[in-house]
Amino acid sequence: MKPASACHRDDIDQNRGPCVAVDGVYDEEDSCADHLLAALSMPAAIIYENDDQPWVHSANGGFHQRFLMPSDRGESLRFKGREWQDRIARFLKGDRVSESFEMPIQGRFGPEYFYCTIGRLKELTDRGRPILVTAVDRTSERTIEKNLRRELMSDSLTALPNRTGFGEAIDDRIKGGPWSDNAGFAIIAIDLSRFSRVNESLGPMAGDELLITVAKRLKSSLRQGDVLARIGGNDFAIFARLNNGLSDALHIVQRVKDALSSPIRLSNLQIRVDCAIGCAIAVSLDEDPDDVVRKAQAAVKIAKRSGKVEIYRNGVLKEAHRRFLVESRLRDALSKGALTLAFQPLIHLSSSEITGFEALARWNDEELGAVAPVEFIAVAEESGLIVELGRWAALEAAQTLARWDEAVGQTLPVGMNINLSPIQMARDDVASMFEEALRFSGIEGRRLTAEITESAIIADPEKARKLLFALKELKMSIAMDDFGTGFSNLASLHSLPIDILKIDRSFVSTMMEDHDKEVIVRTILSMAESLNLKVTAEGIEDQSLAHRLQQWGCWQGQGYYFAKPMNEAEAFDYWRVRWNFETV
């Protein structure tokens, strides 16, 4: 059997018309094939097996143009790619009736993609059973898919991989190898600490410019093979190949710090970029990259609080899961009113009179059990639930006083201290919160004391000043909590409407054994006297502490020596029992 030879005719449509000759002449069978192929709008050909190899018998112009090598009259038609020929040869040797696949070829302007179908024709000829091959051009579809995929995998602002693209890039690097026995990888997470302030003060365009500049600087700090991605609004991450473990990771961290050390100019302003950095090192190449990224993000959260570079340690993800669970349960508890207040008495040290109570939030969850205040309050501050929690506590404390008044038929000579979180002061209208609590409960403002921390004042002095004066207009007292642990000075105390200083328990509880702490306590008492401020000492655990503080002129105390925090009924009974006043 002789192979087919090419025929070139000027009157044939290069996209659809057939161009074929068998032994240099057309027969009736060939004419039918020509008409069949000419009727098809896509590239198509009829192929036979010749000497165990596929040979093109008939093909329209589109098939010639895209898949066959140019040939002169009398030469056999050949496929442009060996892959094409091998694919059809395997089909001819098999027994399948039809088959479909996608085949890429190199076109004039880049890769082209065709969805191809091969099917056996029923008619047998003296050449054997032919097969029909058709190809549908999918190039435009694949180009659109490629562009969409690129958009889905990259950040449009910085052109860096996004969170999804970062994961794929890590997989490519790990699988792309080779990796030596001691090689590993790390994920370094970077959070821009002051980004929100730039957005608020200079606008989103300045924020975008800052992100672009930071991305360029971080990219300049990378080594070959490292991958930089923007995985959040102001969060970046680096995949770094390690040959020397932690030392390599710390070296890259230093390069990042150096890249961001010089100020960035925005709108004629020099902006210094502060960032929190967390790092997680994979224990092996088999470790899930997504887990390593999550570990790095958990480490950077700790870095935001500590102000240092944090390396992930075992248990951090477990702690993060616990915080997430606590947040979810706390949100549910607040909506259902499942929290309670405990009340610790405040004792006048000279007369032993109960001057008031400090209201303390308590939470006993059905699933988590008793959750410590230090845990759920921190979660509330991080999640923003502190606003709802603070409003509930203020209203509940004020209504507790109203219920006690109603129980005895007169106004009790006791007040209530309510703690304010710095986050709550920054995010909520605290003055209106207290005004609402006083209005609903019907008690006077003089019976409420707001306890604030030094850090709340330092964070935004002007806003804190306005708030404190607004609270004084409600006739409320103001106590500075945990005094001595922050950075307050005489000038700031003198300029603020503060009534009471609360000496932190860390100074009071061990002052009898620690001379330095005793000096601190006496200094605070002396300073308060000169400023005409009252002093409350926290952490009074025994009678000797109470007597010593009384001798030094301390006005008020609280601690386990007097009573632990109690529920509402116990606190009311405690006040009634001590109404006749015992000595300290």
Image (tube, rainbow, N blue to C red):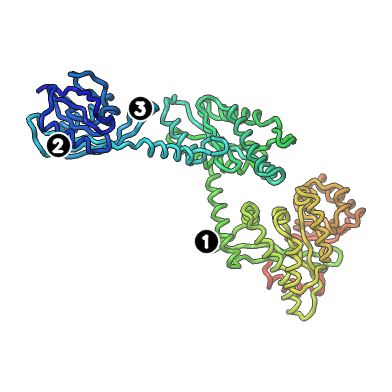
Q: Earlier in the sequence, mark 2 or mark 1?
A: 2
Q: Amino acid at mark 1?
A: Glu
Q: Residues within 10 Å of mark 2 (few under 14, many from 20)?
A: few
Please tell me whether mark 3 or mark 2 is closer to you in this view: 3
Q: CA distance from mark 3 to mark 1?
A: 64 Å
Please tell me whether mark 2 or mark 1 is closer to you in this view: 2
For the residues bearing labels 3 and 2, Cβ distance under 8 angstroms = no
Q: Residue at x 22, y 23 (%)?
A: 8
Q: Residue at x 56, y 62 (%)?
A: 332
Q: Residue at x 66, y 28 (%)?
A: 258
Q: Quadrant of the N terminus?
A: top left
Q: Which mark is residue 107?
A: 3
Label 2 belongs to which residue?
95
Q: Residues within 10 Å of mark 1 (few under 14, many from 20)?
A: few
In the visual, does 280 lie left or right of 545? left
Q: Amino acid at mark 3?
A: Gly
Residue 259 in view of the camera: yes
In the visual, does 13 lie left or right of 237? left
State the residue lying farthest toward the right: 530
In the visual, does 470 lie left or right of 260? right
Q: Which mark is residue 183?
A: none
Q: Which mark is residue 367?
A: 1
Residue 289: x, y in percent?
47, 38
When asked about the image quadrant of residue 105, the answer is top left
Q: Amino acid at mark 2?
A: Asp
Q: Residues within 10 Å of mark 3 (few under 14, many from 20)?
A: few
Q: Is residue 372 above or below residue 408?
A: above
